[in-house]
Image (cartoon, rainbow, N blue to C red):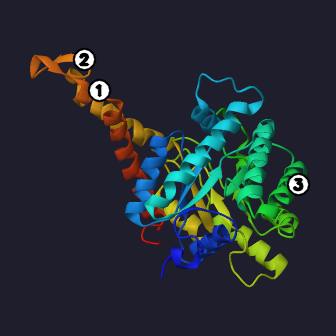
């Protein structure tokens, strides 16, 4: 038996009850699903191939900047219009190609800070339009990240968005406790270290507020997480804090399960396998992957260009002859594919590390 056996939709983009069932299955079978930031059809393909070949579920997510890139870097993003249109375009593309890979896909959007809420509003407009037509939203889930705001505002605003999303059975991920470092234009490199660690009381307050609205939510709790890659020892992760969150909520709500909260691991690039394994054991079902995969994708293209340098300097003429054409070497489909291959390999490593391989 695998995760697909508990889902009504076995392959392609899933939503609603299927997302809930998938995350329940992940907790029960002690694995987490990597969430891959995608910025193009190429990075989508690299991610889907990895999941297919490892027989694993996958989460594909689009950030505000990544969504704008889908629209085109030359497009004006006034009022988040390019990010909204790019998100819609990415969703339709992924929905079109994902079923042929034979694995379940959660379609998600990444960090949405307060200043980016118009982006989320526009995506929800598109979700509701899609829901009215097809009976399901365009995206499986969204993330709202108000971790830089006062806790009361964070929870109240998150609850208002969950109320809007609940009729579509759409999942909502929220963040409490700041993730350090820098990603996609959000810079938290100078925050106080104490802000990187979430308190159990905050987790319970979120659970108490959101759960009566909808069970479709997860929490990215801070346990020292930092975006980006740093020298070993510079980042102090304490995944054992997640166990305290679960125990506190379990006690407060008299839960029958030891892991009543669906947790998310942000800022995971450069972390060790034990840190991942420990966090997964405490109820983490989703681990964000971005920085490591940008590097992996770049390595494939870099190595190809360096290895074929004498074949991509001119359109005609290479070590095999002055009249030899080089089109088959500089065709973007050739060198972009090399980036996909190395990205696929790195995603496969993550699937193995998170115990997600073979779970479909």
4 or 178, nearer to the observer: 4
Question: Mark 1 — residue?
Answer: 330
Kindly identify the residue that appears in the image at 11 percent across and 21 percent down: 319
Residue 345: x and y in percent read: 36, 52
Q: How crowded is mark 1: few (under 14 residues within 10 Å), some or many (20 or more)?
A: some
The residue where tag 2 is placed is 315
Q: Residue 140 carries which label?
A: none
Can you give x and y, in whole percent of width and height, for residue 160 in the image? 88, 54
Helix, strand or loop at disc 2? loop
Vertical position of residue 311 compared to residue 59: above or below: above
Viewer can see residue 351: yes
Which type of secondary structure does the marked residue at label 1 adopt? helix
Mark closest to the chain's N terminus, 2 or 3: 3
Confirm or deny contact between disc 1 and disc 2 (CB under 8 A): yes
Tell me what residue is drawn at x 69 percent, y 56 percent: 141
Q: In the rendered view, does 60 fall on the left or right side of 42?
A: right
- Residue displayed at 73% across by 43% down: 112
Number of numbered callouts drawn: 3
| Measured Cα–Cα span from mark 1 to mark 2 | 8 Å
Q: Report, in whole angstroms, how far the alpha carbon at label 2 lies from the one at label 3.
A: 57 Å
Q: Residue extending furthest front?
A: 133
Q: Where 269 sits versus 317, above or below? A: below
For mark 3, what is the residue?
Answer: 160
Give how far across and how far down residue 154 sits, in percent: 85, 50
Side (left or right) of 323 relative to 230: left
Residue 73: x and y in percent read: 59, 25
């Amino acid at each position: 038996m695998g995760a697909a056996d508990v889902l009504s939709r076995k392959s392609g983009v899933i939503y609603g009850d299927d997302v809930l069932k998938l995350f329940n299955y992940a907790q029960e079978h002690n694995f987490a699903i990597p969430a891959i930031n995608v910025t193009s059809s190429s990075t989508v393909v690299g991610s889907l191939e990895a999941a297919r070949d490892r027989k694993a579920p996958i989460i594909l997510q689009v950030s505000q900047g990544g969504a704008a890139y889908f629209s085109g870097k030359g497009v004006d993003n006034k009022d988040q219009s390019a990010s909204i249109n790019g998100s819609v375009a990415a969703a339709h593309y992924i929905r079109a190609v994902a079923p042929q890979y034979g694995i379940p896909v959660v379609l998600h959007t990444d960090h949405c800070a307060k200043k980016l809420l118009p982006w989320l509003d526009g995506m929800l407009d598109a979700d509701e339009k899609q829901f009215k037509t097809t009976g399901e939203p365009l995206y499986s889930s969204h993330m709202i990240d108000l971790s830089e705001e006062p806790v009361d505002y964070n929870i109240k605003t998150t609850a208002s968005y969950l109320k809007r999303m609940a009729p579509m059975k759409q999942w909502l991920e929220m963040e409490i406790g700041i993730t350090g470092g820098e990603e996609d234009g959000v810079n938290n490199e100078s925050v106080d270290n104490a802000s990187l660690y979430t308190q159990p009381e905050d987790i319970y307050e979120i659970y108490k507020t959101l759960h009566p609205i909808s069970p479709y939510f997860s929490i990215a709790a801070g346990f020292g997480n930092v975006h980006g890659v740093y020298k070993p020892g510079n980042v102090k992760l304490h995944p054992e804090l997640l166990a305290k969150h679960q125990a506190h909520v379990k006690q407060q709500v008299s839960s029958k399960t030891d892991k009543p909260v669906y947790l998310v691991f942000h800022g995971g690039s450069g972390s060790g396998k034990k840190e991942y394994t420990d966090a997964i054991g405490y109820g983490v079902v989703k681990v964000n992957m971005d920085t490591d995969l940008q590097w992996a994708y770049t390595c494939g293209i870099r190595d190809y260009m360096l290895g074929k340098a004498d074949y991509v300097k001119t359109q005609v003429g290479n070590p095999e002859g002055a009249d030899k054409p080089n089109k088959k070497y500089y065709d973007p489909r050739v060198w972009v594919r090399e980036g996909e291959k190395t990205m696929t390999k790195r995603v496969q490593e993550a699937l193995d590390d998170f115990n997600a391989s073979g779970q479909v």
